[in-house]
Image (cartoon, helix red, strand yellow):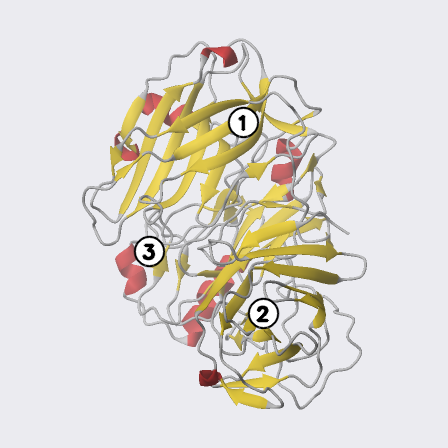
Amino acid sequence: MTKLHSHLLDSDTMKMSWLIDWHGEEVFFHVKNAFRGDDNWFYLGFSKRGEMTEADLCIFQLKNTLFNLATDTYISQDGGTIFKDVTQDCELLRIDDNSVAFKRRFNTCDPQDLKMHEGTMYIAWGRGQDDFDLTESIDKDTLHPLASGVTMIQLLRADKIVIPEKTVSNVEIVLDKVTIPNQETTYWCLVQKLPEFLWHKKHHVVQFEPIIAATSRPFVHHMEVFHCDTDPSVEVPTYNGDCLNAPSETKVCSKVSSLWAMGASTFTYPPETGLPIGGKDYNPYMRLEVHFNNPDLVNGTVDSSGMRLKIVSKLRKFDAAVMELGLEYTDKMAIPPGQVGFPLSGYCISECTKLALPPEGITIFGSQLHTHLRGVRVITRHFRGLRELNEINRDDFYSHHFQEIRQLRKKPVVKPGDALVTTCYYNTLEYRNTTLGGFSISDEMYMRKREHQKTDVKGARSDNYRAIQWTKPRVDILYTMYVREPLSMQCNQSDGHRFDGFDWEDAPITAVPFEIPYVRDGCSFRDFWTKPLVEGMCDLLGECIY
C-alpha cells in the first residue's frame, strides 16, 4: 500500500483521497463532501479525454440509512443514455450523508470500464437531488447536476516526497511587475544574480515551485530557469525584457535548472538527490524565461511570475541534472493537416550517450512531457543495442493543459551507449494548414533532448509546406523521410555546443520498431460482441489515438 494521495475536485471542499495497492492492483477511493444538503446522488468516474460520451461512472445513491446503492454504469456513444453495466465493479465500502468510500481494480477486464493507467486520467464527478431507479438504463437528462466537473490527474502515481531537512532557504527568481505585451507570443527574460550566501558554498536545490498570480494564469504557458554556465568570474549583464533583445552575453545562460508548464505544480527531488547551486566554481547568475501566450491581444495585464527554489546547505548524496530530448523548434518539423496521430520522433542516439554520460550511467527519477496544442500522445522509449527496455515515460491520453513533472515509480538507469527515442503524436483533424515547428503555441514543439531530422529541402520556407496538397501518398513520403533519413544530431552540452568526438551531421538514425510493444493486460476473456469504451480512432499509419 502506498501513501495517501488527495485532490480537490471542485477547488473548494470536495476532497478525493485515494490509496493505491500496487500488489493487489486496486485503488481505494474516499470522497469527502460528496453530498451536500438535500443531495441524494453522487457520481465519480472516468472519461477518456474529458467528454461525457462513453464515460465510465460509479453512481452512488442515498436511499435510506439501511439501503444505499453503488451502481457501475457507462454512458452511450451519443451521450444520451446511462446504462447499468452487466458487470458491477464499483465495490462500496462506506457511504453516509456526507462522504463515500469504494474501491476499484486497475483493470476489471470489462469492456464497458476504462482501465486505470499511469498517464493522464480524466476524473468526472457530479452531484444532485433527482430521484431515479437505475435498473437497466435511464436518459442522461434524468440527472440534473447541481454541480459537476472533470479534472485531470495522474491517478496511478509514485508516492509524494516530503523534504526531510528541517532548515530550508528560499530563493525567488521572479519578474517584477511586467506588463504582458499585447501580442500572441512573447518570451520574456530576466537575468539576475543569486543572493550572496550562495556565492562561496555549494548548496542543493531540493524543491522548486511556480509563483503565478491568478490573473496571470491565462497567459503563462511555461517557464524555465537557466543557469549562466560560464566562468564564475564573468559578470553577466542583468536584464529584464523581451528575450529577442537580450544582450549577447546572456546566451551562456542556457543550462536548465527548473521548469514549469501548464497543469504542473511543485516538484520535489528524491531525498538522496539535489540540484547543485552556488559555490566558488559556480557563476552566480540565473536567467528566468517566461512564455506568455496572449492570442486575444489583451492589454494591461501585469505579471510577476517566476520560480521559488527551496535550498539546503547540507549536500545530499547525489547531484541532479536536467536532460532534454526532442526536436529543434524550426519548420523542418512539419505535421500535415487532417491527421489522427501523426508521429514525430526525437532521437538521443547511442553515440551521444557514449560521450555525454558518465561510465556508471544516470538514473532517471522524474520526467515532464511537453507539446503545444496538437499533441495528444507522447512516449519515451529506451534501447540498449537491439533490445528495447522498459519505457521511460508514456502518456496515451496526453493533454497540453496538464504538463506536470512526474516522479517515476520505476527509476530506469541509462548507460553510455543506450539510445532514447521520444515520439509525439499530433492530431490535426480540425486544421486545414500544415503545422510547423516553432515557439508560438500555434506552432509545435516538444522536449526531451534537442535534435532535428535532416531534410533534403534546403532552406524550405513555411509557405512551401502550406502550399502542398496533402494526399495520402505525400503524407507517406514525409513520414518515410522522417524515419529513414540521417539526422543532424544536436548532442549538446549545457552551453549549447555539441560534444566533440563524433561527426553529428548525417548521424545514423536509431532503428526503432514502428509498433509500440503490446502490453498484455491479463484478461483471459472478452465479449467479442461488445465494443470497448476505450476504442480509438486509427490513422493511415496504423497509430490509434484513444
- Decide which of 219, 73 is in the foreground and name it: 73
- Looking at the image, is 248 positioned above or below residue 402? above
Q: Which mark is residue 45?
A: 2
Viewer-nearest of labels 1 and 2?
Answer: 2
- Decide which of 31, 213 is in the foreground and name it: 31
Whichever of callouts 3 and 2 sits on the residue coming sooner in the sequence is: 2
Examine the image and state in which quarter residue 284 appears. top left
- x, y percentage for residue 42? 55, 71
Residue 497 in sight here: no
Give the residue drawn at x 65%, y 87%.
530
At numbered mark 2, what does the secondary structure look like: helix, strand or loop? strand
- x, y percentage for residue 402? 48, 53
- x, y percentage for residue 293? 31, 48
| Distance CA(mark 1)–CA(mark 2) | 36 Å
At numbered mark 3, what does the secondary structure look like: helix, strand or loop? loop
Examine the image and state in which quarter residue 462 appears. bottom left
Residue under label 3: 442
Question: What's the amino acid at mark 1?
Answer: Lys
Whichever of callouts 1 and 2 sits on the residue coming sooner in the sequence is: 2
Q: Which mark is residue 192?
A: none
| Distance CA(mark 3)–CA(mark 2) | 32 Å
Residue 370 shown left or right of residue 268 in the figure: left
Whichever of callouts 3 and 1 sits on the residue coming sooner in the sequence is: 1
- x, y percentage for residue 14? 53, 57
| Distance CA(mark 3)–CA(mark 1) | 34 Å
Label 2 CA crowd tier, 10 Å (few <14, some 14–19, many 20+): many
Residue under label 1: 310
Question: What's the amino acid at mark 2?
Answer: Gly
Give the residue drawn at x 65%, y 17%.
314
